[in-house]
Amino acid sequence: MKNINDLTKRIIAFRDARDWKQFHNPKDVALSLVLEASEVMEHFQWKNKEEIEEYIETNKTDISEELADVLYWVLLMSHDLKIDVLVALEAKIRKNEEKYPVEKAKGKHTKYNKL
Ligand SMILES: [Mg+2]
């Protein structure tokens, strides 16, 4: 199992070997991230609950690849912007724990400002 730093180094090495950094400004990287997230959504478009369950069983590899594409761009953007994404994630989880205290949010999908 690779850790996130090893994976980021590999992504950057992949990019550098192809001389693609010249194309990776924050706007286009963010756009790529969203496009890959859209490819995740595309798997589920127009399917009902039962169809989705069946689809996941038979298309897990394809869905995995799209999730990996999203993570690829998250790691690349974090690297370029010098953001420690694990530190950021921990801080965000802490923030969400405060915004959504269990006693108020359990079993509800209400936004924090309406709890
Ligand atoms: Mg993709």
Image (cartoon, rainbow, N blue to C red):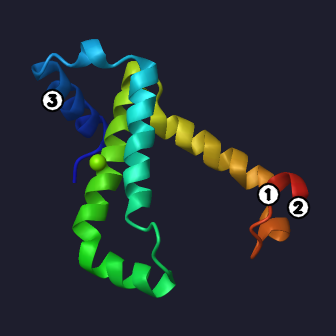
How far is disc 1 from disc 3 in space, using C-alphas? 40 Å
Contact? badges 1 and 2 (CB < 8 Å): yes
Residue at image coords 34%, 76%: 56
Where the N terminus falls, by quadrant? Answer: bottom left
Where the C terminus falls, by quadrant? Answer: bottom right
N-terminal label among 1 and 3 = 3
Give x and y (percent) for residue 28. Answer: 40, 24
Residue labelled 1 has its Cβ within 8 Å of some atom of ligand 1: no
The residue singled out by tag 3 in the image is 14
The image shows a total of numbered marks equal to 3
Residue at image coords 23%, 37%: 6
The residue singled out by tag 1 in the image is 111
Q: Secondary structure at mark 3?
A: helix
The residue singled out by tag 2 in the image is 115
Q: Residues within 10 Å of mark 3 (few under 14, many from 20)?
A: few
Give x and y (percent) for residue 57. Answer: 30, 81
Q: Secondary structure at mark 1?
A: loop
The quadrant in which residue 50 appears is: bottom left
Residue 51 falls left or right of residue 9: right
